[in-house]
Amino acid sequence: MRALLAAGGVPAIVVTHDRAEALVLGDRTAIMTAGAVRQVGPTLEVFDRPADETVARIVGVETVHPAIAVAASEGLTRLRVGDAELTAIGEWPAGAAVLVSIRAEDVILVGDTPSASAGVSARNRLRGHVVSIELAGPLARVRLDCGFALVAAVTRPALGELDLRPGTPVLAIVKAPAVHVIA
């Protein structure tokens, strides 16, 4: 369908409730809910940088939590999220109330051992445990408790390799650019 739309050379508006379809077909995306447009922009920007919690939920961001900015320097902000801290790109003043959103695909799980994250540049290393696992085609959504609820997407083979099941201790790794802060 994308090839047909491009070959026609005529602008087209495609209305869909299917996220995958929007990602494949859209150059620009408008998120509309309750009769109001909430965000318009390049498709990947809308999916990766939602403007608010409603848009984040609509585009499939599984982890959205309130946070408080702790401190900022060198273009990074430390945020208190539940009982954990995250580092994100950007600077917010200490005490600022924000939301953080993290896509499940941006969370890497490793065994919870002292050397598990050695040599990894990611700023966010969160100790936690598996709460539940939902199978979804070739992927599994692993719900974690890392001081706040966090969802990771892993392949089915990774479930076995990491021996993941409820209660399993894990280390969740998230790069700072993958932590989107919503003012």
Image (cartoon, rainbow, N blue to C red):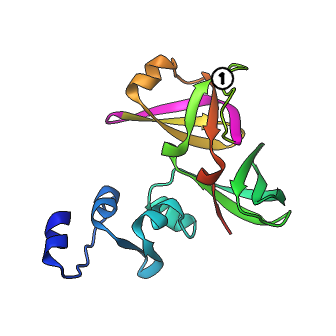
Q: Position of residue 167 (x, y in %)?
A: 61, 23
Front residue (pair 11, 127): 11
Against 35, residue 104 (above or below) is above
Residue type, mark 1 in image:
Ala
Residue 131 position by quadrant: top right
Q: Is residue 116 left or right of residue 46?
A: right
Residue 149 position by quadrant: top right
User: Residue drawn at (73%, 56%), measured in percent from left and top?
Assistant: 67
Residue 136 belongs to the span the image colors magenta: yes
Against 75, residue 165 (above or below) is above
Q: Is residue 181 visible in the rendered structure shown here?
A: yes
Kindly identify which residue carries mark 1. 116
Q: Secondary structure at mark 1?
A: loop
Q: Position of residue 33 (x, y in %)?
A: 43, 74
By secondary structure, the bulk of the magenta-drawn segment is best described as strand
User: Residue drawn at (25%, 73%), measured in percent from left and top?
Assistant: 14
Q: Is residue 64 visible in the rendered structure shown here?
A: no
Q: Is residue 76 left or right of residue 6?
A: right
Q: Residues within 10 Å of mark 1 (few under 14, many from 20)?
A: few
User: Residue drawn at (72%, 39%), measured in percent from left and top?
Assistant: 147
Residue 146 belongs to the span the image colors magenta: no
Q: Position of residue 69 (x, y in %)?
A: 80, 59
Q: Position of residue 174 (x, y in %)?
A: 62, 42
Against 11, residue 86 (above or below) is above
Quadrant in the picture for the C terminus:
bottom right
Quadrant in the picture for the N terminus:
bottom left
How many badges with numbers are in the image? 1
- Span of residues in magenta: 123-138
User: Residue drawn at (47%, 67%), measured in percent from left and top?
Assistant: 46
Front residue (pair 28, 9): 9
